[in-house]
Image: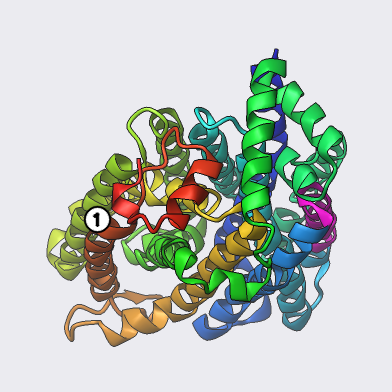
């Protein structure tokens, strides 16, 4: 019974991940239509796309401390309200300026949910199930991305350039599911105990772990809170030497999660597939649906193996595959004119392989690890820092993709679409491949093996000055 309760709580909370995925993915299918509807160039498209990411930065920046004060549940509920309003506003926007503001507003909810949801799930999960339960957040992101692609496909109409509006409206449905569902969920027991609400915390622990395990968990949590009583919960605490590795891990893994270029595929996949030779926006969206399916299936693989094989094995397997697939993708686009029809299909296969390796590794592992490595006193703030980092890096990658494509295009390999010189993405893919290689080297030293280790033991390990790669 207690296992059922844990999974129900995790699934409902992870709906925040579905919204995160939907509202980041829906823009990809909408771009070809609102670009023509408003008469925008690629620079303005980057601005619209990046507006949501700037909002996410603001959400992650200002809500970390609030989450530690008000609780995880309240903040997730607030994000659901913002998701609902933002979806309606985005679909209604009568001008490009209002669409940008709507996406900025919606981005706040994405930023908040991106750290509050994994944090909440990590704190309600037993150590032996924490990896798979927190990874459910990434699984829901991939379901959200796929749902957004299918929604885009359902409403896409090349005879109606305003068809992008219902693509945004449909986001209201999962937002209401999260709002209603979370209203009936308990608060994080670790947060309750940290705020002196011990009986409430013990009650939640008993529901999710059973009465016998509850006493042991309660004592462990209390002991770690007593040890950290002299610690403050502000940003200065994160700068203390004993937490240096946790900060490096939190920021570093999110840097590599974004700079291997995944969101260029999530946001711009129809554009990339048009460059690869697909005819028309609808056929390119079909190819993007394939990306969503691969992303979902291999995230399920990751959820299954993360508590069996461990974090490090998945990390190195995935990053190696990412490096090789990006290298080959660049070669494919470099010889695009010689490969002809075969090049079109080879490029989509390599994109699928790239997405698959990402989905089993650094995609879910980034969110999981930042929810694990910070101590209770600053876990909300630390997770917020990791989330803030991901959105800053995401914004940089998204805003610079077309610019990097143009800058790194080798003369004579340019791709033209409707008379427009789009450049060639080969150089961009090679740039992301170099980053993937750097991620492998960095990961050897800094990716910890947290499989089966309690959050309290991880905190104790940092206090003793342990090195990340030796954590077991």
Q: 268 or 450, which is in the foreground? A: 450
Range covered by the magenta-colored residues: 70-88
Q: Quadrant of residue 419?
A: bottom left
Q: Residue furthest toward the top?
A: 1
Q: Position of residue 157 (x, y in %)?
A: 63, 55
In the picture, the quarter occupied by the C terminus is: top left
Q: Which residue is label 1 attached to?
A: 444
Q: Residue at x 50, y 70 (%)?
A: 394
- Circle 1 — which element? helix
Q: 333 or 467, which is in the foreground? A: 467
Residue 82 part of the magenta-drawn span: yes
Q: Is residue 185 visible?
A: no
In the picture, the quarter occupied by the N terminus is: top right
Q: What colour scheme does the image use? A: rainbow
Q: Residue at x 56, y 40 (%)?
A: 134
Q: Position of residue 270 (x, y in %)?
A: 46, 60
In-image side of 400 versus 172 (left or right) = left
Classified by dominant secondary structure, the portion drawn in magenta counts as helix
Q: Residue at x 39, y 84 (%)?
A: 403
Q: Position of residue 416 (x, y in %)?
A: 32, 77
């Amino acid at each position: 019974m207690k296992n059922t309760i844990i999974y129900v709580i995790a699934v409902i909370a992870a709906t925040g991940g579905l919204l995160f995925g939907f509202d980041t993915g829906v823009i990809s299918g909408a771009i070809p239509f609102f670009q023509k509807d408003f008469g925008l160039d690629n620079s303005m498209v980057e601005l619209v796309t990046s507006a949501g990411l700037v909002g996410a930065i603001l959400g992650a920046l200002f809500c970390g401390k609030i989450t530690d004060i008000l609780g995880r549940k309240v903040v997730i509920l607030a994000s659901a309200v913002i998701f609902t309003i933002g979806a309606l506003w985005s679909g209604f926007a009568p001008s490009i300026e209002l669409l940008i503001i709507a996406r900025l507003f919606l981005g706040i909810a994405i930023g908040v949910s991106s750290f509050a949801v994994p944090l909440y799930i990590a704190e309600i999960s037993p150590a032996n199930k924490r990896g798979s339960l927190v990874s459910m957040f990434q699984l829901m992101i991939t379901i959200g991305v796929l749902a957004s692609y299918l929604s885009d496909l359902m409403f896409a109409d090349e005879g109606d350039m305003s068809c992008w509006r219902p693509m945004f409206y449909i986001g209201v449905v999962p937002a209401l599911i999260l709002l209603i569902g979370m209203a009936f969920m308990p608060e994080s027991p670790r947060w309750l105990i940290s705020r002196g609400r011990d009986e409430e915390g013990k009650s939640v622990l008993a529901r999710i772990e059973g009465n016998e395990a509850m006493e042991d968990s309660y004592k462990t949590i209390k002991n770690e809170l007593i040890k950290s009583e002299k610690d403050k919960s502000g940003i200065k605490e994160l700068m203390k030497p004993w937490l240096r590795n946790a900060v490096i891990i939190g920021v570093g893994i999110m840097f590599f999660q974004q700079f291997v270029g995944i969101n260029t595929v999530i946001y711009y996949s129809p554009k990339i597939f048009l460059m690869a030779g697909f005819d028309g926006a609808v056929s390119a969206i079909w190819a993007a649906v394939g990306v969503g399916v691969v992303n979902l299936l291999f995230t399920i693989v990751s959820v299954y193996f993360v508590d069996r094989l461990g974090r490090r094995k998945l990390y190195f397997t995935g990053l190696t595959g990412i490096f090789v697939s990006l290298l080959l993708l660049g070669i494919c686009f470099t010889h695009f004119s010689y490969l002809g029809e075969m090049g079109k299909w080879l490029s989509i296969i390599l994109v699928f392989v790239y997405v698959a390796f990402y989905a089993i590794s650094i995609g879910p592992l980034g969110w999981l690890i930042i929810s694990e490595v910070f101590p209770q006193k600053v876990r909300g703030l630390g997770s917020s820092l990791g989330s803030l980092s991901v959105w800053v890096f995401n914004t940089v990658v998204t805003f610079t993709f077309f610019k990097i494509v143009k800058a790194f295009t080798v003369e004579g390999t340019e791709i033209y679409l409707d008379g427009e010189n789009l450049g060639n993405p080969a150089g961009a893919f090679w740039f992301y491949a170099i980053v993937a290689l750097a991620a492998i080297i960095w990961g050897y030293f800094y990716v910890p093996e947290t499989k089966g280790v309690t959050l309290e033991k991880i905190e104790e390990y940092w206090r003793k000055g342990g090195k990340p790669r030796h954590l077991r």
